[in-house]
Image: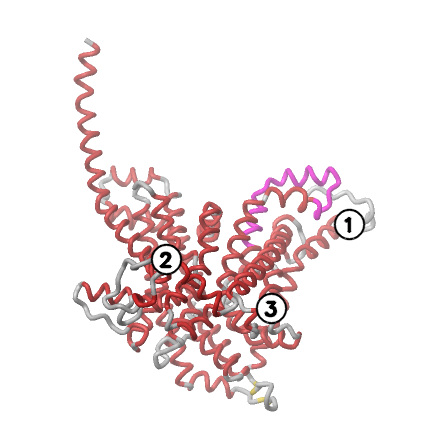
Amino acid sequence: MAIARDIQVGAQPRERLQSKRTASLLRLIPVYIAVVFGAIIFAIPFYWMIRTAVMPTWQIYVFPPDWIPAEIKLDNFLIPFKIFPFGTWFLNTIFVSTAATLGATASSACVGFSFARLRFPFRDTLFVIVLATMMLPQQVRLVPTYLLFSKLGWVNTWLPLIVPQCLAPAFFVFMLRQFFMSIPVEIDEAAFIDGCSPLTLFWRIHLPLSIPALGVVAIFEFRGMWGDFMNPLIYIRKVKLFTLALGLKLFQGNMTVRMQGLMAASLMSILPLIIMFFIAQRSFIQGIVISGVKG
Amino acid sequence: MASIPSTRTRSLRPATREAIYGYAMASPWLLGFAVFTVFPMVAALVLSFFRIDFLTETQFIGLSWWDSVFSDRIVRKAFYNTGVYVVAVVPLNTVLALMIAVLLNQGIAGQSIWRTIYYLPSVVSGVAVSLLWQWLYHPEVGLINSMLYRIGIQGPRWIYSEEWAMPAVVIMTLWGAGAAMLIYLAGLRDIPTSLYEAAEIDGAGPVRRFFRITLPMLSPTIFFNVIMNIIAAWQVFTQAFVMTDGGPNNATLTMVLHIYRTAFENFYFGYASAQAWHCLLSLWFSY
C-alpha cells in the first residue's frame, strides 16, 4: 500500500521536473546562440592575425580575401629578425618588464604593509592621497618628468621606464594593503611578543603569506610594462634599446608592403602575454576581480 | 598593537619606534609621490606660464598659452575628439561587458572557455592590437569590409575617412570589453540566488529581476569601474598614434596625442604643460 501510494504521488513531481528541465533548456538556447556568436566575433581578429602571418606574399592582398592560407609559410616569422634587431627588442622588453615588476612588487609590498599594519602620524590621510593618486591621469606629469630625466641624463636609457615603477605604484599599494589587512592581527601580536621588529614581521611572516597577492601584482605590472608604448617612445632613441612596442611601430613604417611580416611580428610580441595568461589564469582573473569588485 | 619590546633602542618609546618603521617602509611611495606626482604637477603649472623649448631663450608669457588653449582650433578639436571617445566608449563598454557577463552567468556549459575567449583580447594591448586593427580596417582587403561586402554592403573607408575614423577607434576599444566583463561576472556571482528566487515567487519576470535586483546589487562595482574607465579613456594615446596618427585631418587627434606632439615634436614644453593642465581640469570639472 505504501509503495502504491509512493508511485502515485511520485508521478506528478517528475512530470513537473521534466517540463521544467525542458523549459530551462529551451530558455538556454538563445543564450547559447548569443554566447557562441559573440565568441566568434571576439575570436576572429586573432584568427585573422594568425592567418595573415602565415600567408604567402601573393595571397595577402587578394580580393576578396581568402580565409584559408594557400600554404603555411612559417618562415614569415623570420622576417622581423632579418630586417630589425627583433631578438634584441624581445630581450630588452623582457629585461625592462622583469626589472619593473620586481621593483614594483617589492616596493608596493613594503608600502602596503606599512599602511596596513604600522601606525604613524597622518597615515590615514596619506592613504587617502594614495587613493587619489590612483585616479590621476598621467598627462600632467609627462613634460616635467621628461625634463627631470633629461636633466639627470637618463634619456635614452631604460631608467625612466623602470625607476618610477620601483617607487610603489599607488594601485598596487592599495591592493596589497587591503590584502595585508586581511591577515589576522593575532599573528602580529604573537610575533611581537617573541621580540620581532616590524621589518622581520614583514619579511618572515606577512610576505610568505601574501605570495598569491604578490603574484597578482607581478602579473599586472608585467603585462602593463610589456605593452607600454608612450614611455619608451618618449625616452628611447637608440634602436638597439627599443622595446617591442616601439620596435613594432618602427616596423609599421617600413613594412606595410609586407603585411605578413608585420602580423608575424605582432603575433610574436603578444604571444608571451597570452602564454603567461594561460599559465597564471587564476591569478589574472583574481586580480581583475579584486581590482574591480572591491571598489 | 601590543607593545614592541626593544633591546637596543630602549630609549625610544614604542610608538615612536613604530612610526619610524612606518615612515621608513612607506618611503618608496612617499619619495615617488613627491618626485613623480607633486613635483611634476606643480612644475607643469609653472611651465605653462613660460615659453620654453631649450633651444631659444626662456620667456615668461603669463597666461598666453592658456589663452591659446581655449582659442586654438586644434586643441579644441583634440578636446572634442577625446570627449566623444569617452562618451562613446565608457557606456558602450559597460553595457557590452554587462550583457556578456549576464549571458555567461546563465549556467551554460563550458563557461571557462567562453570566459577565456571574451577576456583574451583585453590581455593583449598596445601597439600590436592597433596594428592588427589597422589591418582589419583596410578598406579593400580588410576583414571587416570584406565581410560587409559578402552581405552586400559597401563598407566605409574606416580609418581613412574622417567620419568613420573615431567610430573605428571606439569599436577597436570595445574588443577589450572582456576585462570589465570579468569583473561584472564575479559581481554577479556574489548576488545571492535567494533574492532571485524570492522575486520569481512574487511573479517578477527576468527583465524586472534584472533591473530591480541585478543592477542595484552591482551598482557599486559598476560605478567604480565606470570612473576608472573614464579616467583611462581620457588618456587614450596609443591607438590614435599608431592606428590613425591622429588623422585623417585630426579626426582622431586626442588630447594626450596633441600634448605629445606639442612637447616632443614641436618642443613647446610650456604650451604642452598648459594643455595637460587643461586636460586635467576638464576631467575634474566633469565630476
Identity of the residue drawn at 25% across and 50% down: A34
- Residue A49 spot, x, y in % from top left: 36, 61
Q: Chain of mark 3?
A: A
Do marks 3 and 1 share a subunit? no
Q: Amino acid at mark 2?
A: Ala
Label 3 vs label 1, nearer the camera: 3
Please tell me which of labels 1 and 2 falls first in the chain. 1
Neighbourhood count class around disc 2 (C-alpha, 10 Å): few under 14, some 14–19, many 20 upward: many
Q: Which mark is residue B177?
A: 2
- Residue A58 spot, x, y in % from top left: 31, 68
| Quarter residue B134 falls in | bottom left
Instruction: Tell me: A112 left or right of A20.
Output: right
Q: Which residue is mark 1?
A: B13
What stretch of residues is rendered in magenta?
Answer: A174-200
In this view, the residue in front, A160 or B15, is A160
Provide the secondary structure element on which disc 2 rests: loop
In this view, the residue in front, A74 or B24, is A74
Q: Which mark is residue A160?
A: 3
